[in-house]
Amino acid sequence: MRLVLLVSILSSVAFAQLTPAQKLEAQRITDLMNADAAKQKQQPVKLTPPDQLFKKGTVRLFINSLMVNKPADYEPYLRFVTDEKLLQEAVDTVNGLVALPRDVVVNFRDCGEAQAFFDPKSGNITFCYELVRLFDQLYTKLAKTPEEAKRLIRGAVFFVFFHEFGHALIHELQLPATGRQEDAVDQFATLLLLEQGERGEQAALSGAAFFLALSELPGKKPVFWDEHSLDAQRFFNISCWLYGASPFRQVNLVAQGLLPAARAAKCGDEFAQVRYAWKGIAEPKLKRPFREPAPR
Ligand SMILES: [Zn+2]
């Protein structure tokens, strides 16, 4: 039910009528974010001079046409990923952001499970076709048109790829992280998508929808000891940061009851904190500063 609601928000351009209280709250958060942006402009981050940045590390996409487990439906997905340039655009984005000390190969292949992961030993990222298939199964059911399904799949692929690249970034640049790295890289993925304006916001919501779907699987028990936050928490976190970054555009999340008002009230501060932390730890080693989220 919540999932259907979320996807309808994602695909509709009709915004909820704001109540005066919601409008006031969205304005409060917007003012807070603007004040924060002004403060950060006054204290520009010291970037590493370009000649001292890593020059060599490039992220390369390798799409495996050879199958390991020989799944029958591998080929169509292989074509889908190639034709839609699903991963290539995400790879180009991170290459524009940073160069790591060594090359990173992104392997698209069949794995036997719906996964994507970063391997600290090789420094490579694996994106399993089974995960794209899972997105396809989920979003084709929820979307009203094939185009919409494609958009949702693309968004979720972007989110997961940026999440995995966040692990690569932390590991390869030895960035300090207190707290769970899994949460930190969800933040990184959201920040990077917010740079792309509304399209990126929708992509982050597609990622969030995936976690919401996982949390609603019948019979699924929460894994409290896992290194990841619970799927439902990941959904609420991403929604909160998106709302905090652009409360007017994401007001539907609150108006439709997907993001409880009690959390929403803190999301402006929370997003500012997330952005501040990532700017502080990563920016000096990037090719360029993080871009401001689209105007609120
Ligand atoms: Zn992870």
Image (cartoon, rainbow, N blue to C red):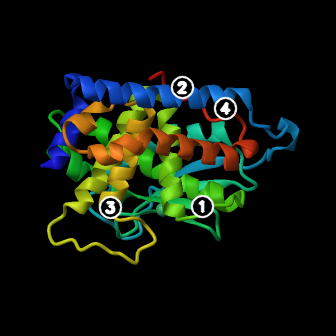
Q: Is residue 88 visible?
A: no
Disc with the residue nearer the chain's start (1 vs 3) = 1
Toward which corner of the image does residue 247 lie, by quadrant? Answer: top left
Mark 4 neighbour density, 10 Å: few (under 14) some (14–19) many (20 or more): few
Label 4: element kind: helix
Q: Is residue 36 visible?
A: yes
Label 2: element kind: helix
**Where residue 34 is drawn, which disc sits there?**
2
Nearer mark to the viewer, of 1 and 3: 3
Contact? badges 3 and 2 (CB < 8 Å): no
Instruction: Report the residue that reaches farthest toward the bottom.
Output: 225
Residue 61 in picture, x, y percent from top left: 55, 49
Q: Residue at x 39, y 29 (%)?
A: 199
Q: Nearer the viewer, residue 117 or 23?
A: 23
Q: Residue at x 52, y 32 (%)?
A: 195
Nearer mark to the viewer, of 4 and 3: 4
Mark 4: amino acid: Gln
**Where residue 124 is drawn, which disc sits there?**
1
Tell me: 221 left or right of 95.
left
Nearer mark to the viewer, of 1 and 4: 4
Toward which corner of the image does residue 251 lie, by quadrant? Answer: top left
Q: CA distance from mark 1 to mark 4?
A: 34 Å
Mark 3 neighbour density, 10 Å: few (under 14) some (14–19) many (20 or more): many
Q: Which residue is mark 4?
A: 40
Q: Quadrant of the C terminus?
A: top left
Residue 213 in picture, x, y percent from top left: 23, 55
Q: Nearer the viewer, residue 186 or 248?
A: 248
